[in-house]
Amino acid sequence: MGQIKRVCLTAVAITLAATLLWQSAPVFAQDSNFVVETYQSGTVYDPYGELPRPTGIEKSLTKLGRGISNVLLGWAEIPVAFDRGVKRGKPLGYLLGVSPVLGTARAFMRTTTGVFEMVTFPFSDRDVNYEPILEPEYIF
């Protein structure tokens, strides 16, 4: 019986040691502003480095995706308006009378804005017209 316990404890200790050694494989160098990870291959990853600016095609495809999202999810403004009213502590009369009207108006605005963005995504002015029309940009 003691032999089985010893073998089990040895196996657990070896597994724990191997796991700890495996987790410490990358070497981390830390500065006050950023973290750089150096791996065995010698590559360096800087998560705070400058990202490339999006191209015109990326901006137009983002506008198309935003338009599709707004068309498909515009109806969700109705329950979102009700939820916002509940979270703000509005009375029941407001929740049953005003929230559906506000939600329907916002749903109409979001859906028509989505149609507008879907139609105009290839014809946009590259500097101005890729910004979102509604805030928040996406409903969820």
Image: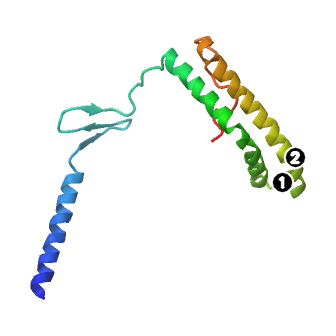
Q: Amino acid at mark 1?
A: Lys
Residue shown at the point (73%, 40%) measured from the top left: 75
Pointers 2 and 1 in contact (C-beta within 8 Å): yes
Rendered location of residue 86, percent (x, y): 77, 54
Residue shown at the point (90%, 55%) measured from the top left: 93
Residue nearest the viewer, comparing 80 with 119: 119
Q: Secondary structure at mark 2?
A: helix
Q: Which mark is residue 69?
A: none
How packed mark 2 is, by other alpha carbons closer than 10 Å (few <14, some 14-19, many 20 or more), is: some
Image check: 16 left or right of 140? left
Is the C terminus in the top left, top right, bottom left or bottom right quadrant? top right
Mark 2 — residue? 98
Image check: 8 left or right of 28? left
Q: Amino acid at mark 2?
A: Val
How packed mark 1 is, by other alpha carbons closer than 10 Å (few <14, some 14-19, many 20 or more), is: few
The part of the image, by quadrant, that contains residue 76 is top right
Residue shown at the point (12%, 77%) measured from the top left: 7
Residue 34 vertical position relative to residue 84 in the rendered view, above or below: above
Rendered location of residue 81, percent (x, y): 77, 45
Of the two numbered discs 2 and 1 on the same chain, state the one appearing first in sequence. Answer: 1
Residue 56 vertical position relative to residue 14 in the rendered view, above or below: above
What's the distance in space between the residues labelled 2 and 1, CA to CA?
Answer: 10 Å
Rendered location of residue 130, percent (x, y): 61, 19
Image check: 50 left or right of 135? left
The part of the image, by quadrant, that contains residue 69 is top right
Residue nearest the viewer, comparing 48 with 118: 118
Residue 4 vertical position relative to residue 126 in the rendered view, above or below: below
Residue shown at the point (26%, 32%) measured from the top left: 44
The part of the image, by quadrant, that contains residue 39 is top left
Mark 1 — residue? 90
> Which numbered mark, 2 or 1, is in the foreground of this view?
2
